[in-house]
Amino acid sequence: MIKTATIRAMVFAALIAFVSSYIVYFGFTTNYTANAFSPPSFKDQYAHQVYKYRILSQYLLTRLDSALGDRFPSKAAEMRLLLQDNHASERFYYSYYYLNTFFMVLLSIVLVLLVDLDNSINIPKNEKSLIVFLVILLINLTQYVVCPYDISSYFFQLLTIFVFLKYLEKYFFTSLIVICLLLVIATLNRESSALTVSFLILLTLCKGGLSKRSLFSLSPMVLSFLITYYSLRYFIKTPDPKNVTIDFVEFNLNFYINRIGILFWFVFIYFTLAIGNSKENRLLIVAYHIISLPYIWTCFTAGILWEVRLYMPLFLGSLFLAKVDPSSFKIRLSSLLDS
């Protein structure tokens, strides 16, 4: 039974999500995303390279655009959109807004449920609303990079963590099946689901040690991600256009705007370490980043760090590692370092 206070907090969080999303999409115009605001231009951009494997969010966006057809005829877009895409469709832009706001509201509800997990997460009562408020606004702040998959990927990440922390011990097999299904869906949406796997590996080993139960639970989780990840790359063979090769490391280090993106990473790494409940929590955050080094390396070598959204899944995982209760852990990182 959900407590009345929790329901009030959900409504509060959902309102923040809705209001802040509307402000971001209609109070500001992206100075970054271009040529992705109409079905043809969207297809040109997202049918190639790593984008072509993010099939779930692309399907949802295009289906939503089609569903709006009768009620919201495609028409010439506002000038602010035409500046970024000569073929921009007002309806298609609204599809971005509706899709991302829908998942933002769902994310805010799961976020409230997570901070209320008093048996697993230690957050003082007066800090819970602040954390919910911060996370929602911070996620929306990163949405100057308008795309269909970020918000939904964060939702799947937090929902998987919630099921893991809330139900795995009590309903092991059912929860394990749900977690594996969520990982499959999340990977169809975006490959950053690997960071959720990193989170689950870290906490499973710390909570259960190197036991048969830990390995038994981790195996299907890891396989769910790997099988989905490599299946997408096996079955989707769309050829990529020949583009000029970019040295992303040099690009990220030498351009001021990307240095600001790197600074964002350091600021929020420090933030999660600063609010960590104990030395053990801070070590968990460090270990999480170490396990996630393949993703971090990919961001530096194949991504543009001005897209600060790239750090958000790491931030969300680190935030809850900063507040997780380690009292029942069989493996304590602080003890390993002190021995």
Image (spheres, rainbow, N blue to C red):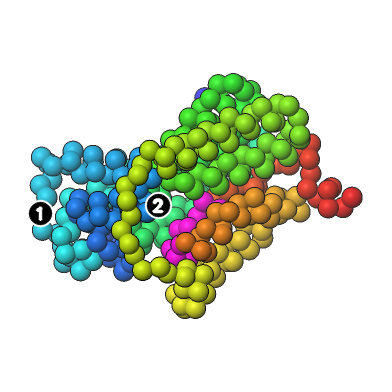
Q: Indicate whether residue 304 is drawn in magenta.
A: yes
Name the side, left or right, on which 268 lies relative to 68. right
The correct choice, above or below, for 248 with respect to 282 in the image is: below
Separation of marks 2 and 1 at Cα, in angstroms: 30 Å
Who's the residue at 10% across and 47% down the image? 73
> Which mark is on residue 46?
none
> Which mark is on residue 75?
1
Name the side, left or right, on which 336 lies relative to 251. right
**Which of these two is toward me, 69 or 227?**
227
Tell me which corner region of the image, top left, top right, bottom left or bottom right, holds residue 326.
top right
Who's the residue at 42% across and 40% down the image? 234
Residue 44 pos. (x, y %): 25, 55
Who's the residue at 36% across and 60% down the image? 145
Q: Is residue 254 visible?
A: yes
**Which of these two is toward me, 20 or 40?**
40
Residue type (three-letter) at the residue carrying disc 2: Val
Quick one: SS at disc 2? Answer: helix
**Which of these two is toward me, 167 or 215?**
215
Q: Is residue 278 visible?
A: no
Read off the magenta span.
Answer: 303-315
Quick one: which residue is furthest to the right in this view? 339
Who's the residue at 70% across and 41% down the image? 325
Residue tagged 2: 50
The correct choice, above or below, for 127 with respect to 172 in the image is: below
Residue type (three-letter) at the residue carrying disc 1: Lys
Q: Main secondary structure of the magenta part?
A: helix
Choose mark 2 or mark 1, whichever is in front: 2
Residue 93 pos. (x, y %): 23, 53
